[in-house]
Each structure stands twice: as C-alpha cells, then as structure tokens.
Amino acid sequence: MAAHDPPGFQEYIAARRDHLVRIGVLLTGDRHHAEDLVQAALVRVWPKWTRVSRGDNVDAYVRRVLTSTFLNWRRRLWHREHPTDLGADAGLLARPAAGDPFAAVDTSDVLIAALRGLPPRQRAVVVLRFYADLSEADCADALGCGVGTIKSQTHKALKTLRALPALRDAATSHGRVEA
Amino acid sequence: MTARHEHDDPPARDTAPGADTDTTPVDTELLSAGLRAGVAHVTAAPDLYARVAEGARARRRRLRTGTAMAVAAACAIAVAGVADPLGWRADTPARTVAADPVGTQGPLPATAPMSAPRGTAVTECPVGHPQPASPGVTDGPMLPPHPGTVLLCVYNATHDPSQNPVNPTITGTVYTGADADRIAANINAVPTTAYTPTGGRCSMLAPRPVLFFRNAAGNEAVAVLDGDCYNMFTDGRVQAQLPQGQHGIGPWLPS
C-alpha cells in the first residue's frame, strides 16, 4: 500500500468488491461496464474515505456513490444501450422443475435481459430492493429521492417485468392469477 | 473499520418488498432469486484496488491542475477587468524605452517580466520570454486588426551566445494607433508558424527584433521579425511565432 492510500480502504475493497461488481453487472448488464462503474465510484469515494469510514454505514455511502455514478453515466449519449428483443428469450422462463440446477440460471438470464429494458432509475430501484435487500427508506437514501418515488418506481418496474411473457408464465405456474 | 456489510447482516425491511405494490411475495422471491443466481458467478478482478488507486491519483492530479488553472484565469480576468476592460489601450503615445543590459549568468527566470505600466499592453521589453505564446495563432491572424499597442524590442548580444549565456542590450519602441495597425496588417498578411523546439535557433550576436503584444482578453503573441532566427534564440531567451518568408526588420515596421 502506498503512503497516501487511505487506511482500511484496500481491506474494504477486498471484502466487498464481488458484491459491488455484481450490483454493477445488474445495473449495466455488462461485466466490463460493471468493472468500470465500480472503479469510477470507488475513485470518487477514495478522497472521502477517512471521513466515510468513521460512519456507521460505509456500504450505504458506497452504494449511493455507485448508483449516482451509474445514473450520471446513463445521461451520456455515447453510453446509451439498445436493448435487443426481450421476447425472443421468453420461453426460457418456464418454472424450473424441482432440483433442476440449471433452470434458475436460465431464469436469471431472462431477468437480467429484462432489466436492461427498464429505465435506469427503475432498474436501480429493482436492483437495490430485490438484490441488495434494501428497505424503501435505504433505497430512497441511496438514490437521493423520496420513499414515494421508490414505491412508484418499484410499481412501474414490476409492472413492466410482469408484462413480459416469460415472467407472466412463471407467476402463473406458481398459482397466481395475473391482475 | 466500522463498515457494515449487508450480506453479513441484512437489514430488516420496513415493509415486504411487494407490500406497497400490486405484486405478491411469489413475484419478488422469484425476482430476488433470479437476480442472485444471475450474478452468483461474477467475481471482481483482483487488481481492482490497484486500478482504483491509480484512478484516484490521476483524478487528484487533474483536480490540482484544474484548480491552479482556474485560479490563474480568475486572477488574469480580475487584473484585466480592472486595468483595461475594453482591451488594448489605443491612446498611448509612441515612445522609446530602453532596458538596462541584463546580466543573466546562469538559468533564465522562470517567468518573464511582461508587466506593463499601462493596462495590459506590453510596453517594457521582457528580459526573457521562455514560454511560447499563442500556440493556436497559426489558425488565424496573429494580431488583431487594431492592436492598439505593440512593442518592438531589439535584443543585441555582446558576445557569442553559443558559448555563454548572452548579456544583451535591449531597446524597445512602442507603436500605437495607425502605426500599430500597419504593423498588424503586415504581420497578418503572411502565414505564421507556431513555436517548435525542434526549429532552428538564432544567435543573439546581431540585433534581433522581436515584437510583443498582449490584450485584456489574454491574447498574447510574440514574433521574431527575422526569418533567419526561426523560433528561438540560442539561449532559449525568446521563443516565438515567426512570420515566415520575410527577412529583416524593414517589411514590418512603419517607415
């Protein structure tokens, strides 16, 4: 570690890098973009680390920087994504048979592809709520908005996802009748 | 370190994820499981910290450079605004100034004393001008059509500058009004070339005329009015743009 490196930062990255990159993958839909996103976010955290590390929730701060970096990236024209035809993969989401270890992976592939079709803020809400297990209040804090916004964004995101044939089939197979 | 890792100790949800929406726990459980399964195999590159450290250092360098440039620009704007908000001083009468011979044995000063007693126009010959001025001037006219004030300095070394740092006598003449306009027209009529350190160098043993000008907007240019000298004197005293294709002082100055 170099002389000017903030103490404890290297250990934090070593402990949390996989988790952060996984969030990045879900946000960006691309492994390489995810690495870049996490790197850019941590570079922004670096100069404030000494103060941040004294707080009681370092992860919350890092998540906030990560999501704001992601949303700022998304505003750049050159970084726009062009989702492909999500319906083409719809058949992969048949409810997995019990004990089928590959079915969950198939499902997740469709989910991740479907995530890319969501607007960036809705996508961030879904990732923070359902992957990082954040409460609505924590999610609102990470995204810098109100709890009401989180609720409405969650509602819109789930409505969009549920409209996909693959996810609708999965829900029906669980005995739920689509509203 | 007091970091709390949510996977180590997941925070309790204030409400179930789908309670406030028209979805069911089945939907959200499926969603959570699918998202986790989709990225379970993803691991970060082991050199992430090294890349972050390098990025942070680069960012710090950029911020420092940007801050320094912003401070310099703010100072320049403040000085220009107070001293000469409308640009060139056009009412300065022609006069001749003579600088004392300068004994510069050893390194040249890092910044040339280009301060002007009136406004922002250069009216005193700098001892040295080690930085090239107006590198983009090759894209357009070197001088404004009505420069207001230009300063001609003649550097005349007393001994061979290739062997020792020169101790030139420096004499300066200020041109204003119509004379300055005529000089600008002459200079602007020929292509110029930006300073290049690989260009030829010129001895200061003979009198070397150099033209200086600067306005309130920060535009600045230096011209060596001698085609043989190319861009720079042998001791690096003056680095300048050069109006090419002309030799001697005659074509440039009012008769």
Image: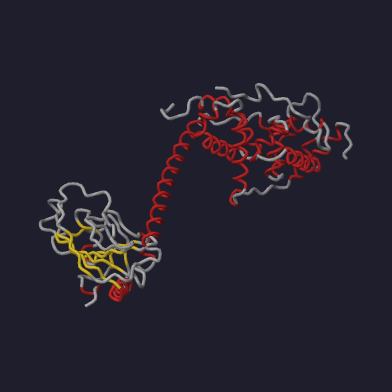
On-image quarter of the N terminus of chain B: top right
Position of residue B72 relative to residue B220, above or below, is above
User: Percent position (x, y) of residue A9?
Assistant: 51, 27
Tell me: B219 left or right of B228: right
Position of residue B69 relative to residue B7, above or below, is below
User: Percent position (x, y) of residue B129?
Assistant: 26, 56
Position of residue B180 relative to residue B124, above or below, is below
The residue positioned farthest toward the bottom in the image shown: B255
User: Percent position (x, y) of residue B238?
Assistant: 24, 57
Rendering quarter of residue A105: top right
- Residue in front for this viewpoint, B239 or B179: B179
- Residue in front for this viewpoint, A31 or B246: B246
Rendering quarter of residue B2: top right
- Residue in front for this viewpoint, B64 or B83: B83
The image's colour scheme reads secondary structure
Rendering quarter of residue A166: top right
Q: Residue at x 28, y 60 (%)?
A: B117
State how many labels appear: 0
Q: Residue at x 64, y 48 (%)?
A: A81
- Residue in front for this viewpoint, A128 or B34: A128
Tell me: B19 left or right of A33: right
Tell me: B53 left or right of A67: left
Position of residue A44 relative to residue B226, above or below, is above
The residue positioned farthest toward the front in the image shown: B82
On-image quarter of the C terminus of chain B: bottom left
User: Percent position (x, y) of residue A53?
Assistant: 54, 27
The residue positioned farthest toward the left in the image shown: B159
Q: Residue at x 28, y 54 (%)?
A: B197
